Image (cartoon, rainbow, N blue to C red):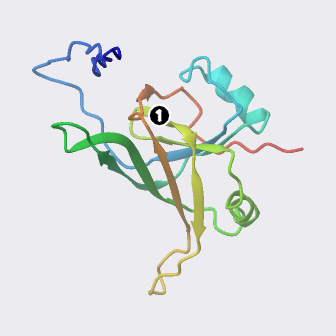
Amino acid sequence: MAAEIYYPGCSTVIPDPNCSDCPPTENGDVRAMFLVKKTFTFTDITDTAEWSAGILSKDIYVFPYTRGTITVAENVVNGFGDQDEKLDSFTYTAAVEEPNYKANYPFWNAIKNARNFKFGYKTENYVHLSDVTAQFIPKQDVKDGKKSQVNWMISAKFTQDNLIEPYDAPTGVFDQCIEITG
């Protein structure tokens, strides 16, 4: 007689939700973006010293002045038993405008071929970093109008299992441009 196998199911420890009558709000817009080499690991993403070390070693590239959006799409797969569908992952798509047009041509022309950078962004108070590497697609769209600006339109896309966790933004990292020479 064959042994019967029973799968234990997908029980997950669920943390208690937070409830507040006056929760803090986080204002949107991709106010800054950053790229992090997949070989670089933060011990504490809120630590300014770690950011400085990563920037100096060219493991992190920071663009402190951007604007843009992030959209998140759920990816579902066929379910089993009574479950029609099962949540599989999330696909993030960033559409970010970066204003250093001529000066950043060499960077964006090279990064389009890179496959070893994670994508990060800053909202009003928080930084967010992908768990996986992203595909970067820089575009040079020119809009109609003599007063329109020509900026880089950066699309970053990646798919990962979990939602991105927000962390407090480190102080001083996104306040100004940081130029590394050599």
Residue 175 on image: x %, y %: 56, 38
- Kindly identify the residue that appears in the image at 74 percent across and 26 percent down: 53
Q: Quadrant of residue 23?
A: top left
| Residue lying at the far left of the rendered structure | 21
The front one of 151 and 156 is 156
- Kindly identify the residue that appears in the image at 40 percent across and 33 percent down: 162
The front one of 1 and 54 is 1
Q: Quadrant of residue 139?
A: bottom right
- On screen, residue 3 versus residue 37, left or right, reads left
Quadrant of image for the N terminus: top left
How many numbered marks have been drawn onto this rendered protein structure?
1
Is residue 143 depicted above or below 69 in this figure? below
- Kindly identify the residue that appears in the image at 19 percent across and 44 percent down: 84
| Residue lying at the far front of the rendered structure | 1
Q: Which residue is mark 1?
A: 127
Quadrant of image for the C terminus: top right
Is residue 43 depicted above or below 88 in this figure? above
Density class for disc 1 (Cα within 10 Å; few <14, some 14-19, many ≥20) is many
Is residue 9 depicted above or below 149 in this figure? above
- On screen, residue 148 versus residue 64, left or right, reads left
Residue 49 on image: x %, y %: 67, 21
The front one of 92 and 59 is 92
Residue 159 on image: x %, y %: 47, 46
The front one of 124 and 88 is 88
Amino acid marked by disc 1: Val
Residue 113 on image: x %, y %: 71, 60
Secondary structure at numbered mark 1: strand
- On screen, residue 114 versus residue 16, left or right, reads right
Is residue 44 depicted above or below 110 in this figure? above
Q: Quadrant of residue 103?
A: bottom right
